[in-house]
């Protein structure tokens, strides 16, 4: 009798263990952009690689287009452990208390992806990601998107054209200063609300890499797009530190490999995705695309680079100087 019951207990125990072992670890990955963007595609690629490398031990659920959380909510949800992966724009880390990330918002600080990648894929990038840890957040990697252009319902050629315009921005004080330097009125707003705000005239204009403008159909409610490429927008992929460190070591290593491959993929497709979106906007015929002349670009640059000095205290002058050194940016040469 006793033998029978202990055999039964053993069998039940084994069954419970087997059920547990076959139950995949679920990772929710939420983001705010469309699936057919650099970030949307990279998130789907990560899902595919993570599930393949862990042989199904991990299941990744990707929630695009703010379907799970909007900008501000997603950071809080990550800290609470309600979502495991996010890739917020670097302009959205101020509210978390890590304002140094706004260094990426400084107008014209990067001329191209090569300069940017020296920072994101080098020691400065790693150091910035490490600064998230006291917030219970682990920074895994950086993913590229692209260079932003301004849009509105009027042509935007010179700094004077921006005066008095209500411009939607992400939650970054550097972007706030940038719009004010042009005499515009910045308004912080969640990405999910921008299309409607532009459509109804709550704001007059905005700035975005073209992949975001096109996939949110903003070009349908903005008559003019000026290819200013005055600043950069990209992402840090982040996770809940406790969750990540609590994963079995072999699974974590496989996920790190999947993340490495996804970063290569993201950074390979980013420029092409933005170029294709620009072509699609052009083809739609819904907005007038303007390329500023060299003189107009110089005037805009002159007006906007004043923001760098104003933001030194917020970002830390040492950090700004280190990035200048990495990219070769020299404000005195303007
Ligand atoms: C925005 O809010 O404009 C962007 O950060 C959206 C995104 O994630 O690319």
Image (cartoon, rainbow, N blue to C red):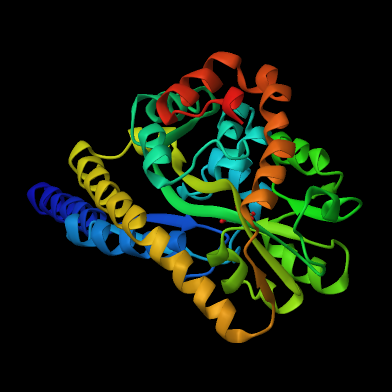
Percent position of residue 63, x then y: 50, 64
- Return the residue found at the far right: 164
Q: Which quadrant holds residue 292?
A: bottom right
Q: Which quadrant holds residue 115?
A: top left
Measured along the vertical axis of the image, is residue 61 above or below residue 231?
below
**Residue drawn where x is 30% and y is 48% of the image:** 259
**Residue drawn where x is 60% and y is 17% of the image:** 316
Percent position of residue 128, x then y: 46, 27
Q: Which quadrant holds residue 239?
A: top left
The foreground one among 217 and 154 is 154
Q: Is residue 302 left or right of residue 166?
A: left
Q: Is residue 134 left or right of residue 155?
A: left
**Residue drawn where x is 22% and y is 46% of the image:** 257
Counting labels gives 0
The foreground one among 179 and 21 is 179
The foreground one among 114 and 88 is 114
- Return the residue found at the far left: 3
> Which quadrant, please, contains the C terminus?
top right
Percent position of residue 187, x then y: 82, 49
């Amino acid at each position: 009798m006793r033998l029978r019951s202990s055999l039964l207990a053993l069998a039940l125990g084994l069954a419970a263990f087997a059920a547990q072992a076959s139950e995949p670890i679920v990772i929710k990955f939420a983001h705010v952009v469309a699936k057919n963007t650099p970030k949307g595609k990279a998130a789907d690629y990560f899902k595919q690689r993570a599930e393949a490398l862990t042989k199904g031990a991990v299941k990744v659920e990707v929630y695009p287009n703010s379907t799970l959380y909007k900008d501000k909510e997603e950071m809080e949800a990550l800290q609470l452990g309600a979502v495991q992966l996010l890739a917020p724009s670097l302009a959205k880390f101020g509210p978390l208390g890590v304002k140094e990330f706004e260094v990426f918002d400084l107008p014209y600080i990067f001329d191209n992806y090569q300069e940017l990648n020296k920072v994101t894929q080098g020691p400065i990038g790693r150091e910035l990601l490490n600064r998230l840890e006291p917030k219970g957040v682990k920074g895994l990697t950086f993913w590229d998107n692209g260079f932003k252009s301004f849009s509105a319902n009027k042509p935007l050629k010179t700094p004077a054209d921006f005066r008095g315009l209500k411009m939607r921005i992400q939650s970054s004080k550097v972007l706030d200063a940038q719009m004010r330097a042009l005499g515009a009125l910045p308004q912080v707003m969640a990405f999910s609300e921008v299309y409607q705000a532009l459509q109804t005239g709550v704001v007059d204009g905005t700035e975005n890499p073209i992949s975001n403008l096109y996939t949110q159909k903003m070009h349908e409610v903005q008559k003019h797009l000026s290819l200013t490429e005055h600043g950069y927008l990209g992402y840090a992929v982040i996770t809940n530190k406790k969750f990540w460190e609590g994963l079995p070591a072999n699974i974590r290593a496989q996920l790190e490999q999947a993340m490495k491959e996804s970063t290569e993929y993201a950074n390979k497709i980013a420029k092409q995705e933005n170029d294709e979106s620009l072509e699609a906007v052009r083809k739609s015929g819904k907005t007038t695309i303007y390329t500023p002349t060299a003189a107009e670009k110089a005037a805009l640059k002159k007006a906007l680079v004043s923001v760098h000095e104003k933001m030194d205290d917020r970002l830390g002058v040492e950090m700004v100087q280190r990035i200048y050194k990495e990219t070769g940016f020299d404000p005195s040469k303007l």
